[in-house]
């Protein structure tokens, strides 16, 4: 398989503390030539930067996760802005809304989300969107804040074809991970088949959401090959073609040469 780009991973997770280097090596052996690690709060932003500085094929995104919105201070937003000048930081994320976990009030989530979209427009970085059970508000806020100016990625997309269309119209790529390989995942498969090839991305979100046949186990970046294989099956392409298409899309989205 040609170059794969895992556009969303958490290699700095404690779940990799015992074998992180082996996990990275397995990804490379599986053909994963690029990875984007996501720093999403006060703890994971420094470890994400450290990974990106250690490995030339790992890039970084920095942002504030909606679950942690309640903890974000003005100084944290300024910190994210400063980090956007780092040569390996290619996006702001993951940011967005999460109505599943009751940890941050909705009004706080909305404020933090809007602040980070405005920052992304200020610094000219794409954004990576976390959306859990908040489709309508996500689309509304992206539109109100003119997020189309920078675009970005709808990470691990779980919405309807109609929601996908609205996001595509706002200059976003649609990214799919392990859930699209699940036998009962009818809607994600339907959406994937409707996304234009030049807006398609793949990811793992490791260590979470492992694809079939590893569902329920720890995910890792090498498994992005299984997502590519499922996308190829659905689209009538080869896995190599999907790997090449999605890697080029990822590099274009994040400005990686």
Image (spheres, helix red, strand yellow):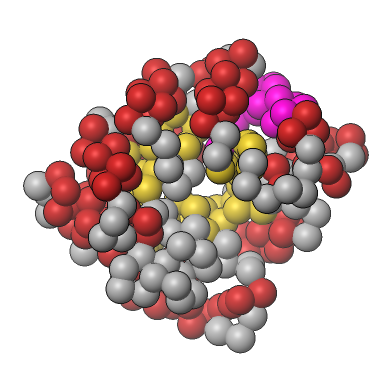
**Which residue: 80% across, 54% down?**
42
Residue 114: give x, y in percent of width and height: 71, 25
**Viewed as shown, does residue 69 lie left or right of 125?**
right
Q: Quadrant of residue 21?
A: bottom right
Give the vertical position of 250 relative to 30 (above or below): above
Residue 106: give x, y in percent of width and height: 74, 33
For the magenta stretch, what is the residue range? 110-129
Q: Does residue 5 show up?
A: no
Q: Does residue 195 show up?
A: yes
**Viewed as shown, does residue 95 lie left or right of 31?**
right
**Which residue: 49% across, 58% down?**
205
Residue sitting at the far bottom: 18
Position of the N terminus, as image quadrant, is bottom left
User: Number of callouts in the render?
Assistant: 0
Principal SS element in the magenta part? helix
**Which residue: 64% across, 37% down?**
97
Give the vertical position of 228 relative to 197 (above or below): below
**Which residue: 78% across, 43% down?**
104
**Viewed as shown, does residue 232 lie left or right of 224?**
left
Q: Which of 55 and 120 is in front in this view?
A: 120
Q: In which quarter of the image is residue 82?
A: top right
Residue sitting at the far left: 236
Residue 194: give x, y in percent of width and height: 23, 32
Magenta-drawn stretch contains 116: yes
Give the vertical position of 14 relative to 87 (above or below): below
Position of the C terminus, as image quadrant, is top left
Give the vertical position of 57 relative to 142 (above or below): below
Residue 170: give x, y in percent of width and height: 45, 19
């Amino acid at each position: 398989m040609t170059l794969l780009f895992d556009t969303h991973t958490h290699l700095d997770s404690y779940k990799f503390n015992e074998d992180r280097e082996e996990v990275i090596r397995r990804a490379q052996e599986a053909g994963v030539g690029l990875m984007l690690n996501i720093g999403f709060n006060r703890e994971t932003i420094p470890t994400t930067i450290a990974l990106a500085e250690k490995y030339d094929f790992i890039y970084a995104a920095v942002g504030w996760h909606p679950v942690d919105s309640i903890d974000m201070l003005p100084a944290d937003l300024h910190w994210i802005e400063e980090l956007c000048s780092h040569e390996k930081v290619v996006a702001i994320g993951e940011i967005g809304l999460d109505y599943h976990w009751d940890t941050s009030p909705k009004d706080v989530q909305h404020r933090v989300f809007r602040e980070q979209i405005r920052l992304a427009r200020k610094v000219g970085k794409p954004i990576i969107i976390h959306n859990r059970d908040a489709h309508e508000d996500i689309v509304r806020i992206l539109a109100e804040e003119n997020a189309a100016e920078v675009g970005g990625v709808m990470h691990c997309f779980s919405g309807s074809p109609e929601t996908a269309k609205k996001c595509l119209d706002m200059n976003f790529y649609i990214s799919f991970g392990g859930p699209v390989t699940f036998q009962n995942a009818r809607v994600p498969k339907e959406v994937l088949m409707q996304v234009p090839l030049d807006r398609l991305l793949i990811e793992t979100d490791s260590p979470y959401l492992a694809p079939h046949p590893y569902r329920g186990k720890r995910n890792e970046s090498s498994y992005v090959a299984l997502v590519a294989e499922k996308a190829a099956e659905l689209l009538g392409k080869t896995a190599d073609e999907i790997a090449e298409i999605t890697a080029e899309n990822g590099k274009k989205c994040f400005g990686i040469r």
